[in-house]
Image: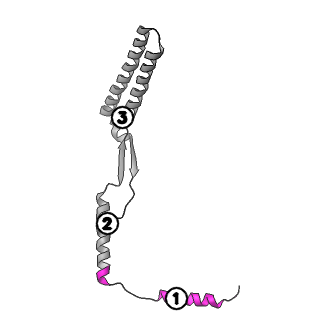
Amino acid sequence: MRDNHSDMKMEEAIWASMKMTEVPDPELNSKLKTALYRQEAVLGKQPAMHKISLWYLPMVLNLLTFSLLALAALLMIENIYLSYFAAGVCLYIGMAGILLTAAGVKRANIKEDIMICIEKRGVWT
């Protein structure tokens, strides 16, 4: 290793800057503290998590699937009685899914269990 005079100059500048003891104006300090406390109060009032309940999602997907199957049965099956029967069964199963979801919400309390929690980012304004 070699000695560099520029390193010594840099080190002296660093030591000199560390020795500075300038104190900010007390009025400015109090204004900054007030602004900081105000922003903390605003962020404290906002909920930390945004919750999206998905308890209805199985019901909607079940109803959509069996409605499309009922439509396919009406369009594809040539025998009119058989197509109406198949479409009726599909719609019945879709309605049963709605009933089962409503019973599950009432009995098993799944509204709190099937939920996505999205953490909000703190925004400093």
| CA distance for labels 2 and 3 | 37 Å
| CA distance for labels 1 and 2 | 36 Å
Q: Residue at x 40, y 50 (%)?
A: 118
Q: Residues within 10 Å of mark 2 (few under 14, many from 20)?
A: some
Sequence-wise, the earlier of marks 1 and 2 is 1
Give coordinates of residue 51: x percent, y percent. 35, 47
Give coordinates of residue 31: x percent, y percent. 29, 76
Q: Which residue is mark 1?
A: 15
Q: Is 106 colored magenta in this rendering?
A: no
Residue 16 as seen in the image, left or right of residue 45: right
Rendered position, 36 above or below 29: above
Amino acid carrying mark 1 in the image: Trp
**The N terminus lies in quadrant:** bottom right
Q: Residue at x 43, y 24 (%)?
A: 68
Q: Which residue is mark 3?
A: 56
Q: Residue at x 45, y 8 (%)?
A: 79
Give coordinates of residue 77: x percent, y percent. 47, 13
Give the magenta part as a residue range: 1-28
Q: Residue at x 62, y 89 (%)?
A: 6
| CA distance for labels 3 and 1 | 65 Å
Q: Residues within 10 Å of mark 1 (few under 14, many from 20)?
A: few
Q: Which residue is mark 2?
A: 39
From the image, state whether disc 1 or disc 2 is nearer to you.
Answer: 2
Rendered position, 89 above or below 28: above
Give coordinates of residue 67: x percent, y percent. 40, 23
